[in-house]
């Protein structure tokens, strides 16, 4: 498939390599290894002289199809699939950084990402400075001689803060560092970070790419040099945080409907956000599609819609927030997001419970905060389900 097609067409047709059976739907190759015609061919495959599959820790046709499709959607030269979003971030760092390197990361990252940088990578000599997601000058000021990577998530989880990708790409370039963007919340349908100057895009395919809450997966995308043999893929080949063929197949099929789902999630989220703003017990609504969002203009330039995630703060703190959660009958109480079914989370006691209180305070994760990943139910039904807890106060 060439770049002449629109995104929704690429999402259906990229990565198809029909077998001798001429199947119409993508085949699922459940095999751990591949047979060679001869000793000479085996040797040529292992040396890299002949392209082709060897062993599914590092290549599998179904996984390759997923990688080709996601690369087409992000406009990336190369993609490496991983077993989860977290292993995508780990593979990115392990593939590209060394002990003694310095990372600047947004303060408003997914909880596990903060822990990965803070608790694990630190033990291996990679030091991280956390700065505000929105203050470009703070990123510039945090640059050191050994800064190798700038890492952001935009919109952020759960407060939907918007980081300026173009401005941070310029900071990275000047510092001789790479900018990595976790594009989980937007997906390539709403935002294409490589076009805005980012060097690397990270995905948790577990979220919108699968889109139906079934399997875990992840990916790292960028140019061939960073992502393939000497970089991220080199780490994956040796260390093995590989995406399974089955999960790749599920996500590959999920991507076929990514565009219409993202548009429907966004439309529903916009309606819920506007409605929440009018609720007397809601202190504040965080949604990049609302004119009240502090980076509304930047969001409009950088992403196509506000996306599917809405966070809001209850006036009554944790008690009021838990009441909303416990009064739901339709919305699922679960930490996942990007599912067709709406999900509701109390970040302070779940996704962000393992970071320190101080880190939560700085990141603005208050006790009254709730995050709803708006699904594809009728917006009216979602409102009715939330209204029960909101009005019971
Ligand atoms: C879920 C998530 C991750 C981690 O992905 P997993 O597939 O759960 O490992 C990383 N970043 C963001 C923004 C996420 O929402």
Image (tube, rainbow, N blue to C red):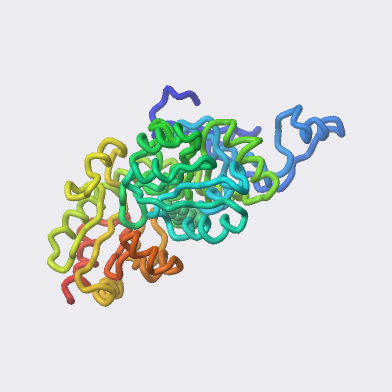
Residue closest to the eye, 126 or 231: 126
Number of disc labels: 0
Residue at 67% from the left image edge and 43% from the top image edge: 58
Residue at 25% from the left image edge and 73% from the top image edge: 317
Q: Position of residue 347 (x, y in %)?
A: 36, 65
Q: Position of residue 82 (x, y in %)?
A: 57, 48
The quadrant where residue 319 appears: bottom left
Does 12 sit above or below residue 97?
above
Q: Is residue 245 visible?
A: no
Residue closest to the eye, 145 or 84: 145
**Residue 326 falls left or right of residue 93:** left
Residue at 25% from the left image edge and 39% from the top image edge: 300
**Residue 314 falls left or right of residue 188:** left
Q: Position of residue 203 (x, y in %)?
A: 47, 46
Residue closest to the eye, 175 or 80: 175
Q: Is residue 299 visible?
A: yes
Q: Position of residue 376 (x, y in %)?
A: 31, 53
Residue at 17% from the left image edge and 76% from the top image edge: 393
The quadrant where residue 258 appears: top left
Does 102 sit above or below residue 200?
below
């Amino acid at each position: 498939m060439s770049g002449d097609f629109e995104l929704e067409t690429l999402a259906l047709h990229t990565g198809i390599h029909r077998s001798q059976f001429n199947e119409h739907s993508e085949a699922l190759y459940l095999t751990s290894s591949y047979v060679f015609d001869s000793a000479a061919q085996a040797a040529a495959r292992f040396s890299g002289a002949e392209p082709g599959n060897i062993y599914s820790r590092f290549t599998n046709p179904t996984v390759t199809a997923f990688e080709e499709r996601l690369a087409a959607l992000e406009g990336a030269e190369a993609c490496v699939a991983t077993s989860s979003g977290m292993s995508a971030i780990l593979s990115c760092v392990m593939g590209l950084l060394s002990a003694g390197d310095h990372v600047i990361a947004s303060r408003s990252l997914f909880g596990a990402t903060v822990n990965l940088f803070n608790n694990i990578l630190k033990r291996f000599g990679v030091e991280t400075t956390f700065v505000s997601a929105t203050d470009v000058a703070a990123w510039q000021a945090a640059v050191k001689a050994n800064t190798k990577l700038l890492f952001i998530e935009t919109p952020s989880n759960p407060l939907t803060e918007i980081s300026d990708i173009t401005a941070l790409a310029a900071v990275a370039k000047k510092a001789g560092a790479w900018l990595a963007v976790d594009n989980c919340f937007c997906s390539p349908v709403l935002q294409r970070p490589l076009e805005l100057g980012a060097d690397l895009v990270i995905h948790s395919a577990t979220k919108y790419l699968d889109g139906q809450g079934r399997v875990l997966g992840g990916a790292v995308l960028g140019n061939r040099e960073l992502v393939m043999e000497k970089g991220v893929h080199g780490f994956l080949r040796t260390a093995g945080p590989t995406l399974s063929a089955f999960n790749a197949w599920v996500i590959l099929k999920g991507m076929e409907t990514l565009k219409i789902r993202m548009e429907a999630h966004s439309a529903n989220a916009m309606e819920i956000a506007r409605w929440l703003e009018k609720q007397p017990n809601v202190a504040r609504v965080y949604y990049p599609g609302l004119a009240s969002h502090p980076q509304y203009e930047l969001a409009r330039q950088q992403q196509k819609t506000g996306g599917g995630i809405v966070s809001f703060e209850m006036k009554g703190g944790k008690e009021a927030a838990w009441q909303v959660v416990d009064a739901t009958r339709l919305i699922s109480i679960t930490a996942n997001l990007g599912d067709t079914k709406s999900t509701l989370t109390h970040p302070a006691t779940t996704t962000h419970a393992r970071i320190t209180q101080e880190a939560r305070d700085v990141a603005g994760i208050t006790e009254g905060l709730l995050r709803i990943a708006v699904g594809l139910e009728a917006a009216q039904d979602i409102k009715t389900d939330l209204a029960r807890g909101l009005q019971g106060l």
